[in-house]
Image (spheres, grey):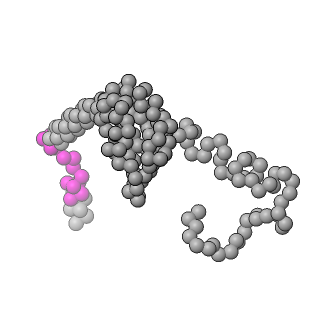
Amino acid sequence: MSDNGIKAEDDHFQPREEGGDDEEEISAMKRRVAEMEAEAAKLREMQASLDQGDDGLREDKEDIDARSIFVGNVDYGASPEEIQSHFQSCGSINRVTILLDKFTGHPKGYAYVEFTEPNLVAHALVLNESMFRGRNLKVVPKRTNLPGMTRGGRGRGGPRGRGGFGRGGYDRGYDRGYAPRGGGYRGGYRGRPRGYAPY
């Protein structure tokens, strides 16, 4: 009986005949790799065409910004037609955009005027400080926003940081030699917070 058990194990561990099955698997893998490479090439082509389109859009945006002006201190009740009639003496206008607050839908108090030609922007700058609905308008050329650039160019925080003792920012006078009675707040339990305080 033990001989039969050993013989059965030997039959079980006999190497398979390599041949047709492995070659089929290898050829199937090669086909899959070729399909994946073709798909990757298509994706690279699509990405290249999108990048070229982005460059074209950026150039188009810069062209539009070069022939546009920013108009500040606009009356909240003003309509695009009224702003267009105010700037009509400068030349032909493509579009007037009054910016609205995205939460309330009310006007923010400034607008953009896009002219048909870039040289008309200089004519529109003459209307800086002109009266419109009882307000002095601020008229400046529209600047082009560069992606990834923040207003100060430094990112979050800037030179001031978050405050502290003697570093600028929020200063309670501790660096000048006096502290409130009891030494001020030095950590520990401050009691139960009142109201909503997310930080």
On the image, the x and y values in percent for residue 38 come to 21, 34
The residue depicted at 37 percent of the width and 27 percent of the height is 120
Query: Which residue does the image show at 22% across and 37% down from the upper left?
Result: 39
Residue 93's place in the image compared with 173, above or below, is above
Decide: is 64 above or below 18: above
Residue 152 appears at what percent x and percent y?
Answer: 56, 39
Q: Residue visible at 87% across and 53% down?
A: 177
The magenta segment: 8-21
Q: Position of residue 84 (x, y in %)?
A: 34, 39
**In the drawing, does residue 128 fall left or right of residue 188?**
left
Q: Nearer the viewer, residue 144 or 141?
A: 141
Q: Is residue 155 above or below residue 193?
A: above
- Please say whether residue 12 is one of the residues in the magenta stretch: yes
- Screen quadrant of the C terminus: bottom right
State the residue in front, 128 or 54: 128
Note whether 102 is above or below 69 in the view shown. below
**Would residue 167 appear left or right of 140 to someone viewing this image?**
right
Give the residue drawn at x 38%, y 56%.
Answer: 105
On the question of residue 187 being in view, the answer is: yes
Q: Report if residue 145 is visible in the image.
A: no
| Rendered image quadrant of residue 88 | top left
